Image: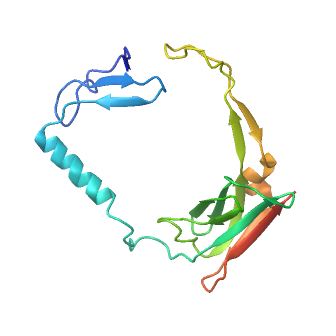
């Protein structure tokens, strides 16, 4: 691990929980981590926040009602794995997403895992890209060096990734069955 030199305003220079300086470090993978020694009070507060934030799949009364929704994505008749599917219900201002498996199947999630989509008319977008890193294997980019930009290859045509240009729609109903097939060309 190596240390980064950084400039920080005096207001941000101290950790709010402990009033101790923050040390920023980065791994060779470029992931940033913030390290600080927390007091018992800070650790307790952090624990409570994490427990509340991860309290399971309890239903929030403010959440819109959802209906189970799933489907399949095909491109030129073949299932597409790893495509991101988004259903946007503009009237309800809600969106549900899913990722396709090796059979092209997806289950939609709005608030909790596989809880479906808010019923109503949906505008659908589907995106699948492969990102190819063009940096040489032995390149040292850790000191702020820049390699060539990655190459983005659209596995399915880019137009399907833009909801208002995809031409894809769906109607999710409370009664269901809400199983949709998108055979993209």
The residue lying toward the viewer, choosing from 92 and 123, is: 123
- Horizontally, is 101 left or right of 34 in the view? right
Q: Position of residue 74 (x, y in %)?
A: 79, 61
Q: Residue at x 33, y 20 (%)?
A: 8
Quadrant (top left, top right, bottom left, bottom right) of the N terminus: top left
Q: Which of the 4 quarters of the picture holds residue 23?
A: top left
Above or below, comparing residue 146 to residue 103 in the picture: above
Relative height, residue 16 to residue 167 (above, below): above
Q: Position of residue 109 (x, y in %)?
A: 55, 65
Q: Is residue 71 left or right of residue 93?
A: right
State the image quarter where residue 145 is shown. top right
Q: Residue furthest bottom?
A: 175
Residue in view at x 72 percent, y 66 percent: 72
Give the camera-side residue of 173 and 180: 180
Any part of residue 89 in sight: no
Image quarter for residue 59?
bottom left
Name the outermost residue toward the left: 40
The image shows residue 125, relative to residue 56, as above or below, that is above
Camera-nearest residue between 16 and 38:
38
Q: Is residue 26 left or right of residue 15?
A: right
Residue 174 percent location from the top left of the image: 60, 83
Look at 32% across and 30% down and name the residue there.
34
**Residue beneath the point at 72% across and 61% down:** 104
Where in the figure is residue 128, as x and y percent of width and height?
Answer: 71, 48
């Amino acid at each position: 691990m190596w240390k980064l030199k950084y400039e920080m305003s005096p207001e941000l220079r101290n950790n709010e929980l402990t009033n101790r300086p923050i040390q920023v470090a980065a791994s060779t993978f470029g992931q940033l981590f913030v390290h600080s020694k927390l007091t018992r009070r800070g650790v307790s507060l952090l624990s409570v926040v994490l427990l509340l934030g991860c309290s399971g799949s309890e239903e929030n009364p403010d959440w819109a009602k959802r209906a189970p929704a799933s489907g399949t994505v095909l491109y030129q008749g073949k299932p597409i794995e790893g495509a991101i599917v988004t259903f946007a219900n503009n009237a309800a201002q809600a969106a549900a997403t899913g990722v396709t498996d090796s059979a092209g199947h997806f289950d939609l999630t709005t608030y909790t895992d596989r809880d479906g989509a808010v019923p109503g008319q949906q505008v659908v977008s589907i995106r699948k890209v492969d990102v190819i890193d063009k940096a040489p294997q032995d390149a040292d980019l850790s000191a702020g060096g820049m390699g060539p930009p990655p190459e983005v290859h659209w596995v399915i045509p880019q137009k399907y990734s833009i909801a208002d240009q995809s031409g894809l729609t769906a109607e999710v109903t409370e009664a269901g069955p809400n199983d949709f097939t998108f055979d993209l060309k």
